[in-house]
Image (cartoon, helix red, strand yellow):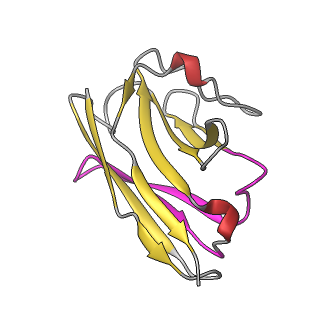
Amino acid sequence: VQLQASGGGLVQPGKSLILSCAVSGLSLDLDFYAIGWFRRAPGKSREGVLCFARKAGITYYSDSVKGRFTFSRDNSQNTVHLHMNSLTAEDTAVYYCATADSGYGCYMNRMGAAEYDHWGRGTLVTVSS
């Protein structure tokens, strides 16, 4: 499985940005998997932002992004998107997408980063005026 994240850049506070993660080696429509977005802000530890578990039908959002970020899938392009709205400086980070072959790693109330097998290279999001 290979993942390629894209869409990062400089954005003003309050604005929106969409990140994409193109997936190969795994069918978003047919396979059982978990896919997640993580981020690492400068000087901080990695944070799980949101995830989707196809078999369980779970979509989890961390408290820090709930109500502002949403997840979508484009099965025809085998790509997932992270829609980020009302961005603040605290959202500045390198964002990564990752998949878990087991289908685990995405639960109702948490993400298990250690359960993700494949990671893409990150894309930098900078929120600044």
Q: Is residue 48 above or below residue 31?
A: below
Left or right of 90 in this view: 12:
left
Left or right of 125 in this view: 62:
right
Q: Position of residue 81 (x, y in %)?
A: 42, 57
Question: Which quarter of the picture shows residue 25?
Answer: top left
Q: Position of residue 105 (x, y in %)?
A: 58, 23
Q: Is residue 129 above or below residue 124?
A: below
Please report the residue visible at 54 percent of the width from the left and 39 percent of the height from the top: 52
Q: Nearer the viewer, residue 76 or 112?
A: 112
Q: Is residue 71 magenta?
A: yes
Please report the residue visible at 63 percent of the width from the left and 23 percent of the height from the top: 112
Left or right of 107 in this view: 125:
left
Q: Is residue 95 above or below residue 110?
A: below
Q: Nearer the viewer, residue 48 or 58?
A: 48
Please report the residue visible at 72 percent of the width from the left and 46 percent of the height from the top: 62
Q: Position of residue 11 (x, y in %)?
A: 50, 78
**Where's the N terminus, which quadrant?**
top left
Q: Nearer the viewer, residue 100 or 86?
A: 86
- Residues drawn in magenta: 61-86
Q: Position of residue 48 (x, y in %)?
A: 63, 38
**Where's the C terminus, which quadrant?**
bottom right
Please report the residue visible at 22 percent of the width from the left and 53 percent of the height from the top: 77
Which residue is farthest front? Answer: 43
Q: Is residue 53 magenta?
A: no
Q: How many marks?
A: 0
